[in-house]
Amino acid sequence: MSNKNKLFSGFSSVAIHGGHDKDPSYAHLTPIYASSTYVFDEAEQGMRRFAGEEKGYLYGRWGNPNTTEAEDKIAALEGFGVTDENGNPIVLKAILHASGMAAISTMLIATLKAGDKILSHYSLYGGTQQLIEIVLAPLGIEVIIIDLRDLNAAADAIKLDSKIKMLYLETPANPTIQCVDIDELTRLAKFNNLIVAVDNTFATPYLQQPFKYGVDYVVHSTTKFLNGHGTAIGGVLISKDLAHMSGYITKVHHLLGGSSNPFDTYLLTQGIKTLEVRMERHCHNAMEVANFLEQHPAISKVNYLGLISHPDFDIAAKQMKHPGAMLSFEMKSGLDAAKKFIDKLQMCIRAVSLGTCDTLLCHPASMTHFSVPKEKREQYGITDSLIRMSVGIENVQDILADLEQALR
Ligand SMILES: *Cc1c(COP(=O)(O)O)cnc(C)c1O
């Protein structure tokens, strides 16, 4: 029996069984379909499949059983418990990509054209910002960046420029873990007929479900918490416009060629199964770490959505189940102290990226933002001593002990 369209009452049941189809050879897990092409019994069958009259795979870039399972699982999670205007369970379609950037590229290229503008917040993921500036700007698609926590500023910006076609939200976002109000901003955008897209990577569908507020698209870098183990790069684009997703957007995805591969997709599918238990532990540990850091004499500031001191505490409490696993902090002494601290870590890992079982720490000023001039960095809150932390699911006393000895 297929678990495909079953409605489970719990999130983890969907995470584990959702999207799974019984394997023709009775393998428990969907095997890795390492095959670039698919076979026809006869030419007529090929014709029927190409015409869409008969279901079946054709060519690896256009999908395989591993892709279908991951896509259906993620769509079920993103829509878990979410209802449409009529109170019926929402139905979503997900398209898996080779990376978060590939998913974002498909979405932007498929929905915008020359002359259109994107309205967004000033702490966009670096890759997204550069995609817009380096690739889309020469094609005539521009971005307007403002502080979207100011709803009046958002309303004014939309009123002032009729070329704005899309509101692009990323919440929570780097590096100071800012949040914007998905509900209020989506209302405003929909009143003005804008497309609304949300990068939900930091939160995952377990903590936050933007489709509750009527957004059009959600993207994830599945590389992060969805995979959860740091074993593969991947991305996903999700929408409730099923016809558009199966039609034009799938076409654009196939033509841009950013398809995932069976092995990475297999790893993603296994990783997602533990999303709920991992996120619970991630968030629990992050709260403990934030409390520890906030009281530590060497630390001047902690940015964590679970702390009342965070300016976006209320927005996070309104739209997220827990405050997440991402935090950042500033040390009282500057650049050298921050580098020394990072170098002294023994268990926690010095690396960029986020969302793995392991605790990861990075020092943006010497790593991701090394090439950005100091004044520009600081505008985005990236001071010399800022450390970003993706709190892992190790035993929290070991994380705290490692931080303690490194801060000494
Ligand atoms: C990592 C990340 C991306 C890009 O994803 P890749 O899988 O690296 O291509 C996009 N948005 C956010 C918020 C990210 O953290």
Image (cartoon, grey):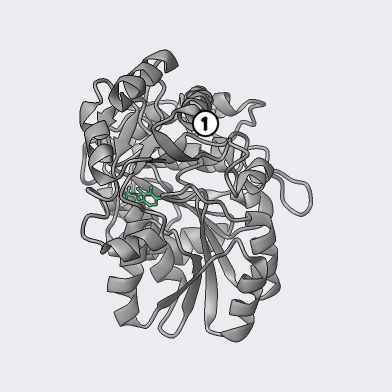
Taking the spot 62% from the left edge, 51% from the top edge, the residue there is 211
Q: Is residue 251 above or below residue 359?
A: below
Asked if residue 186 lies left or right of residue 137, the reply is right
- Position of 29 relative to 49 (above/below): above
SS of the residue under disc 1: loop
Can residue 2 be seen at all in this image of the molecule? no
Which residue is drawn at the image coordinates 70% and 64% (left, top)?
A: 187
Q: Position of residue 196 (x, y in %)?
A: 57, 64
x then y, percent, for residue 165? 54, 76
Answer above or below: position of 80 versus 239. Answer: above
Give the quarter of the figure containing the C terminus: top left
Is residue 362 rendered to the left or right of residue 237? Answer: left
Q: Is residue 83 above or below residue 391?
A: below
User: At x 66% / y 47%, what residue is drawn?
Assistant: 90
Specify whether 185 is left or right of 51: right
Residue 242 horizontal/vertical position (percent): 56, 57
